[in-house]
Image (cartoon, rainbow, N blue to C red):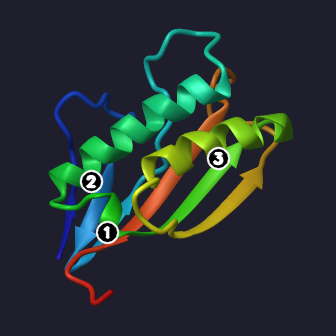
Amino acid sequence: MIVPLEAPGVPPIGALSHGARAGAVVALTGQVAVGAAPGLGAREQAEIVWDRIEEILRAAGAGFDDVVKITTYIVDRADRTDVAGVRNARFAERPLPASTLVVVAGLAEPDWRVEIDVLAVLDRDG
């Protein structure tokens, strides 16, 4: 069964769901700083994105402990350290999940500097 996920306080992404849950698997749509003030740097956008990811995971009955894979897209290689620092702070008390970083030519909107999607698995054995 797949159920689209919506989270109170997280702006919609056009016609897309914020994610879907199929059994124990929760897959989040790539999250960006929709509605954020223009001109924010990658670190500030990453903070907003991780706040939204946390809220969406919570709506799915999950949390950062359930995340098994992170994919991060950035538009400038120079932002790598800042964006990773925000991620690492969110996982400071737990092991980092598998992770991929991709540098892209651009995201869907020119002001977006970072997009992050995650995959979580509920009720898994350590």
Image quarter of residue 105: top right
Mark 1 and mark 2 in contact (Cβ < 8 Å)? yes
Q: CA distance from mark 2 to mark 1?
A: 9 Å
Q: The C terminus appears in which quarter of the rendering?
A: bottom left
Q: Which residue is mark 2?
A: 57
Question: Where is 56 relative to 37, above or below?
Answer: below
Q: Nearer the viewer, residue 58 or 38?
A: 58
Locate residue 9 relative to residue 41 in the image: left or right.
left
Q: Which residue is mark 3?
A: 84
The reply to whether residue 15 is in sight is: no
Q: Amino acid at mark 3?
A: Ala
Which is closer to the viewer, label 2 or label 1?
Answer: 1
Say which label, 2 or 1, has the lower sequence index. 2
Circle 2 Cα neighbour tier, 10 Å, few/some/many (<14 / 14–19 / ≥20):
many
Q: Amino acid at mark 2?
A: Leu
Q: Which mark is residue 66?
A: 1
Circle 1 Cα neighbour tier, 10 Å, few/some/many (<14 / 14–19 / ≥20):
many
Counting from the top left corner in percent of width and height, residue 5 is at 22, 52
